Image (cartoon, rainbow, N blue to C red):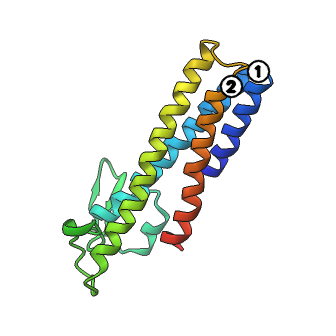
């Protein structure tokens, strides 16, 4: 999702440079949508199960666990007994941890991924600001520095994810 958004922000920059403002606005909005979707996926499919043991019903990993029969929000979330508790540092209470360093791993994991998520949100704010200024006609083929700077920031966030993903997930 973030790699697709990298393409759309680059396309938005090109569209501003060439005076195609309607396409630039559409690409900026799509980039914002990708950022929002990334954050929603991270919260719903990643953080919620690890912290609490509640899985979203569409989570593909839910099928690997026995059904406890507990559901919430009209069946949108299903509880897996013994899965939650993978929190950082002193909040850690995962019952099946055998190594005393496991809480440290989760602290590093959450520090890296939540800091990245914060930067995604900051990037979304910058892109929304660019969108508003573009709507007002403050950017065009002769002046698009703000659009490029927001795009560079977004690419940096993408680059960080390219390093975080294999480091933490593979």
Picture residue at 38% right of the left edge, 74% below the top:
65
Is 57 on the left-hand or right-hand side of 19? left
Picture residue at 34% right of the left edge, 55% below the top:
77
When the figure is inspected, residue 25 is found, relative to residue 64, above or below; the finding is above
Q: Quadrant of residue 104?
A: bottom left
Quarter occupied by the C terminus: bottom right
Q: x, y percentage for residue 52?
A: 27, 62
- The local crowd at label 2, few if under 14, some if 14 to 19, many if 20 or more residues have their Cα within 10 Å, is some
Residue 53 shows in the view: yes
- The local crowd at label 1, few if under 14, some if 14 to 19, many if 20 or more residues have their Cα within 10 Å, is some
* Disc assigned to residue 141: 1
- Secondary structure state at the residue bearing disc 1: loop
Is 129 on the left-hand or right-hand side of 72? right
When the figure is inspected, residue 32 is found, relative to residue 44, above or below; the finding is above
Residue 55 shows in the view: no
Q: Nearer the viewer, residue 68 or 142?
A: 142
Q: Quadrant of residue 33?
A: top right
Badges 2 and 1: C-beta atoms under 8 Å apart? yes
Q: Which residue is mark 2?
A: 144
């Amino acid at each position: 999702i973030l790699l697709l958004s990298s393409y759309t922000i680059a396309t938005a920059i090109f569209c501003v440079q060439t005076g195609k403002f309607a396409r630039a606005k559409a690409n900026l909005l799509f980039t914002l949508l990708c950022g929002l979707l990334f954050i929603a996926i991270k919260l719903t499919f990643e953080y919620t199960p690890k912290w609490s043991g509640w899985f979203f019903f569409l989570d593909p990993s839910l099928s690997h666990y026995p059904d406890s029969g507990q559901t919430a929000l009209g069946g949108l979330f299903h509880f897996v007994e013994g899965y939650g508790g993978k929190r950082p540092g002193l909040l850690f209470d995962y019952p099946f941890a055998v190594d005393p360093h496991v809480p440290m791993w989760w602290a590093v994991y959450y520090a890296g991924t939540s800091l990245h998520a914060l930067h995604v949100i900051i990037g979304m704010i910058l892109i929304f600001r660019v969108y508003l200024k573009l709507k007002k006609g403050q950017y065009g083929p002769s002046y698009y520095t703000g659009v490029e700077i927001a795009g560079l920031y977004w690419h940096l966030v993408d680059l960080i994810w390219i390093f975080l993903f294999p480091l933490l997930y593979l």
